Amino acid sequence: MAPINPAISHITPTTTLTYFLLLLLATTTTTTPILAITNLTALLSSFPDFSSFTSLITSIPSLTSDLSDRSALTLLVIPNSYLSSSLDLTRRLSPSALADLLRYHILLQYLSSSDLHQVPPSGALITTLFQTTGRASSNSGSVNITRNPVTNAITISSPSPFSSSNATVLSLIMTLPYNVSIISVNSLLVPYGFDLMASETRPTLGLNITKALLDGHSFLVAASLLSASGVVQEFEADEGGAGITLFVPTDSAFSDLSATAISLQSLPADKKADVLKFHVLHSYYPLGSLESIVNPVQPTLATEDMGAGSFTLNISRVNGSVAIDSGIVQASVTQTVFDQNPVVIFGVSKVLLPKEIFGRNPVLTSKPGNTDMGNAQPPVSALSPENSPKMLSSAPGVREEIKSGVGGLQWLSTLHLLCVVFVCNCI
């Protein structure tokens, strides 16, 4: 194998301009890593050799939401010539299974060329985005990177000794120090134990959600709303693939809401449907998985309709219970109404109100004597140390200079002027 080439291949004026402008974003705002990372498809669009892989990434909008709080990552991409043999497989996967497969190609650590060449022969275990979903058993959501000391060939594989999935690093395509690195590999990686047959043709459970709620006795209002809105049919259609998790407010939760200035009944039909979809995760999370969830910010069915980063729920443990923070209210899981893979239904103590519809600070007047978790301050969520990505800082002095008042403004003005000159020269 040829030594890894840190230079950017296929350099054209358009490629260079795209790189420069994204680098400009990366050095002129304190939210830079988010801007650069969530523009991965913009970076990849400059490389036609990876168009098939770019299309796969683009087809899963929820990946952008997953990356919104990351500041360092390495993306493994597969050239068209190597990916062509696996495209039939990716087409058979359900959207949720394909999303997890792609998450396995996003390493939560920035790796440069020197980092790769300093990997010890025994290897280095790197966490992937798939590990944060809670759906990876043990460390199967990680990859093991090894280097052959004789040939310097870099291999990436599953840490399981029984896995046959591995890929060889071809070249380093691009880096945005110290946040984004893009590396090409010669094969699609499959996590050990991953169900490649989890397609949309998987038989559904055939659960009548409305009947299950009526049988629960404390969910008559929710059952009525779901039935009247028509979204329950959509929920039942999603029982295949990765399954669904429903958070259903109890009748007392709706009673508490009626004592406030907020009225669900006054919402247009489409907004009311969004609120109901906001109570559903597009994955099967039994109680044990919720209690040990690694990535607290979870997209909902409303996220899939309204766009990445919106209509998300923050799930954590508070005082020994599972807490669900909508950004406005915090509810607790009160009971398990139904649990049979791939569907689980939980009763919750509050109606989950999305801030995208009700604003960040609506007037909520609780009933006298109500002391449940609904008005508690949202919990501070953090990844556990063993699952936290390696946080690499920006180039020395950059962020400090931005924050230094007048001097920072002069620095920004100069940089923007350089950008204009650069663009003019490219034209």
Image: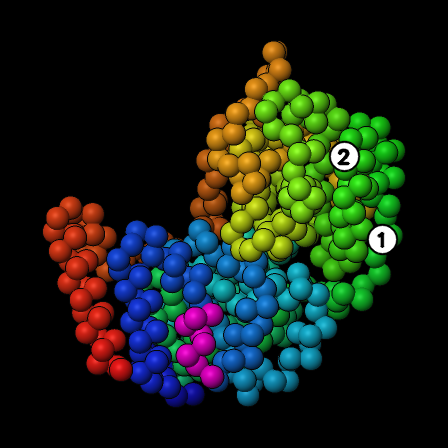
**Residue 205 circle label:** 1
Q: Nearer the viewer, residue 404 or 158?
A: 404
Structural distance between the alpha carbons of marks 2 and 1: 21 Å
Label 2 Cα crowd, 10 Å radius (few <14 / some 14-19 / many 20+):
many
**Residue 363 circle label:** none
Q: In which quarter of the image is the N terminus?
A: bottom left
Q: Magenta segment, which residues?
A: 41-48
Q: Which of 111 and 374 is in front in this view?
A: 374
Q: In which quarter of the image is the C terminus?
A: bottom left
Quick check: 412 left or right of 124? left
Is residue 341 shown to the viewer in this render? no
User: What residue is shown at x 16% (from left), y 53% (from top)?
Assistant: 409
Q: Quadrant of residue 218?
A: top right
User: What residue is shown at x 21% (from left), y 81% (from top)?
Assistant: 425
Magenta segment's dominant SS is helix
Disc 1 residue type (three-letter): Leu
Residue 406 in percent (x, y) is at 12, 48
Q: In which quarter of the image is residue 94?
A: bottom right
**Residue 222 circle label:** 2
Secondary structure category for the residue under label 2: helix
Residue 133 in percent (x, y) is at 59, 53
26 relative to 376, above or below: below
Q: Is residue 47 magenta?
A: yes
